[in-house]
Each structure stands twice: as C-alpha cells, then as structure tokens.
Amino acid sequence: MSRYSIFSLARNALSGHRNWPRQWRSPEPRREYDVVIVGAGGHGLATAYYLAKEHRIQSVAVLEKGWLGGGNTGRNTTIIRSNYLQDESAAIYEHALKLWEGLSAELNYNVMYSPRGVMMLAHSVHDNQVLKRHIYANRLNGIDNEWLSPEEAKRFCPPLNIGRNIRYPVTGAALQRRGGTARHDAVAWGYARGADGMGVDIIENCEVTGLRRGADGAVTGCDTTRGFIGAKKVAVVAAGHTSVVMAMAGVRMPIESYPLQALVSEPVKPVFPCVVMSNSVHAYISQSDKGELVIGAGTDAYVSYSQNGGLHVAEHTLDAICELFPEFRRMRMLRNWGGIVDVTPDRSPIIGLTPVAGLYVNCGWGTGGFKATPGSGHVFAATVARGEPHPIAAPFTLDRFRTGRLIDEAAAAAVAH
Ligand code: FAD
Ligand code: PYC
C-alpha cells in the first residue's frame, strides 16, 4: 500500500515537485516482497518504477542505507550524452537519451532536462583522430555527433580560449547537440514519487548487511538493520559498494571503487551556454540553473571508499579550466564533494543475472551512469521481471569477463580513471 492519501496526491499533482519528498516518510518494511532492490539511487528507483509500471510487479521494496538519492545520484555533475564508441554502448545510452527527452512528462515531474549540447575538446592529432572515430561510429548508429573547427567551437561556446599559446591548444571538438544536463535530485525524487504512487515501498535508513540463500542456493532475502526482509528476487544496485554487497552472497565482482569529485563556483548570471569536456586535460564544466559553474575532475589514483577526492586532483582540474576559460580565473569556489564510483575493467556496466538464482546486479557505471539512469532502470526492470536479459542489456553480462567479450569504453568515459 502506498502512503499517499488521495488528498496529498492531488496536492502534488497541482504543485509539481514542491511537496515531495518533504511530506513523504519511509514506511515500515513488510516481511516479504516479490522483489527487493538494494540501493535507492536513480538506477534502483527507476528499476522500481518500471517494474511497477511496465511489468505490474508492485510488491517491491527499495532498501537504502542512507537517504534516497544521497549516493552518486545526488553527487554527480549531471552530464547526459550518448556519444559512446561501441555499438552495445551506443544502444543503451541512446535508449536512455530518448527516455530523457520525455522524462518530465512521463513522471509529471520537472527533471529539468536541458539539451544544451555537449562539446568534447581535442588538443592533439591523436585527440582529433579519436573523436572523429567516435563521430563516425555514432553516425552509423544514428546518433548525432559532429566535428567543429576551433573557431566553430568558440562560436558555440564563446568563453573558450582557442589561443595557440596555451599548454594544450584546442585543435577541434566533437559536438553532440542533443546532449546536456538535468537536475539530479529531481530524477531521484521523480522516480521515487512515481514508484511510491504505484505501491512500491522505499525504505530509508535500512542498510543491507547480509544476503541469505536457501538450501537450493537461491536467494531468499536480505538481513538489514531493520530486520530480515524476505524476497523472491533481490536486485543489487548499490554503486560504489556493489562488490561489498555481492560478497554477502558469495559472488566476487570484477569491480574497483574510486573516489570521484566535483566542485561548484559561486553563482553568477548565465555565462556558460553548454557542457564542455576535455579528456586530455581532465576537466569538464557546465553552469547549473542556480548559476554555479559545475566543474569535475578525474578519479583519484587509488581505490578507496572515501567520499572526498584528493585536493591535488581538484587543483589540477582548476588549472586546466582557468587555462581554457581565462575569464573564470577570478571566481571563487563554493564547495566540493566526492562520490564513490565502481569501475569495471572495460569501463562498461554489468547488468543482469548472476550465478546465484534470484540475484540480479546492475553496477559498474563508473564515472558515467547518471546519463544512463532511465535506460538502465528500464532494461534492468525487464531483466528482473522476465528472468532473462532485455536485448539491450544482454551484452553487459558478468560473464563477459570470463569469455573475453569486453566492451571497451575507456576513451568514451571522457573522465580520467
Ligand atoms: P547511487 O546513486 O550511488 O545509488 C546507490 C545507492 O546504494 C546509494 O544511495 C547507497 O547509499 C546505497 N547502498 C550502498 N550499499 C548499500 C547497502 N548495503 N544497503 C542499502 N543501500 C546501500 N555520470 C554521468 O553520466 N554524468 C556525469 O556528469 C557524472 N558526474 C559524476 C560526478 C561525480 C562527482 C560522481 C561521483 C559521479 C558522476 N557520474 C556521472 C556517475 C553517476 O553519478 C553514477 O554512475 C550514477 O549516479 C550511479 O547511480 P546509481 O543509482 O547506480 O548509484
Ligand atoms: O560521463 O559524461 C560523463 C561524465 C562527465 C563527468 C563525469 N562523467
């Protein structure tokens, strides 16, 4: 049963997201569900939403050790694009991008998706060749991406310094015009409200501490800080801690966890029209609707579960930003933070079944899973509901690290790691 009264639903419908999640409270967990999802980030909540909406599975609980959206979903820099190299990746990220285009209407909740264009800079002959290869591969997959000269790049993004006398002069850029940004909290809240309205239980402050298996080896539920919760199926979507949670069922994951940080400047009037990323100088930047410049770096060099990034990484990023956009040199930084990203050997996600019956996993999105949120939830819900991989999810098996059918996206991740 949902905790929504008809009155509060009507009020929400009238006022958009302002009443949510303020008036919402986690329910007491039931003893048994059809599906338990571990992790109330965007991917877990989207999975719950599509399970309820498209597969009519409403006996679903989403268990969250903290608060919903408090993991990477609420910590990321919200860049959305689908300009990945390999066909398998292009398919899933483009599936997600198409869902982004209608998401506010789907959820009746403004996720502030803004297709303002994502421009990836080249700084050398090698960069030119790599980005052009991406452009051609994308176009073959029906995905928009175009090459810009330095002058065209500056016309698209006037603050960009295309002088030849900087350490890494801009030699061109790849532009995906349909790429952009969205509001991360709104994505979590929108999916949560939608799932909650269809009867899904979203239970905060409920850490999963164990995964139980029956005599036949199949999963039977989760031990949690709020007691045992039985489940016919358990879906782990616990970015950053996937390997910890999966080890509870005896499954060893090919995952390493790294801190990834970001920072924002003081808010200013609109000065930055798009998203700019540079893989070579390890920096990316956009401007939020609040006016802050949103700036990100690469991951730390060492594995860790710390939600802080090394200061030297931020310093290096700011050096690069100030060189590319000299007019920001005198701005003040407001705050910085970190998240823990889970990285696979080929930098592509793992979505699907596991060696344990009834146990499913969705992880390994590394530095780039925000953009995938709707597509990931959509195909994972189908996979969990049917007990077999959705066609778009099928290549992203755990098994590929045994068979060698890797999906190498180290370059398209566009963030050093
Ligand atoms: P999360 O939002 O992290 O959700 C997982 C949840 O699981 C967490 O809330 C956590 O508390 C919970 N959990 C963990 N263990 C347990 C347990 N034992 N019991 C119960 N709950 C548990 N991606 C992009 O596409 N574009 C970007 O611009 C971008 N920028 C980024 C910038 C930064 C600084 C960071 C850190 C990440 C960035 N990413 C970006 C990556 C993106 O944020 C993630 O890939 C994505 O948000 C993952 O979503 P999720 O729902 O899987 O994970
Ligand atoms: O995947 O586009 C991305 C991204 C940008 C910043 C972090 N990840």
Image: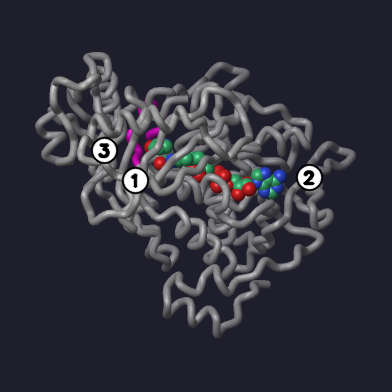
Give the SS element for disc 2.
strand
Q: Is residue 111 above or below residue 14?
A: above
- Assess whether residue 86 is covered by the magenta stretch: yes
Which disc number belongs to residue 332?
Answer: 1
Disc 2: which residue: 209
- The residue located at (62%, 18%) in the rendering is 402
> Measured from the top left, where is residue 303 in percent x and y?
60, 26
What color scheme is it? one colour
Which span of residues is magenta-colored?
81-90
Sequence-first tag of 2 and 3: 2
Give the SS element for disc 1.
loop
Measured Cα–Cα span from mark 1 to mark 2: 42 Å
Residue type indicated by callout 3: Arg
Sequence-first tag of 1 and 2: 2
Give the SS element for disc 3.
loop
The answer to the question of whether label 1 and label 2 lie on touching residues, with beta carbons closer than 8 A, is no
Q: Is residue 347 above or below residue 386?
A: above
Disc 3: which residue: 329
Residue type indicated by callout 2: Thr
Q: Residues within 10 Å of mark 2 (few under 14, many from 20)?
A: some
Where ligand 2 lies, by image quadrant? top left
- Assess whether residue 167 is covered by the magenta stretch: no
- The residue located at (42%, 73%) in the rendering is 16
Determine whether the beta carbon of the residue marked 2 sits less than 8 angstroms from the nearest atom of ligand 1. Answer: yes
Q: Residues within 10 Å of mark 1 (few under 14, many from 20)?
A: few
Residue 82 sits in quarter: top left
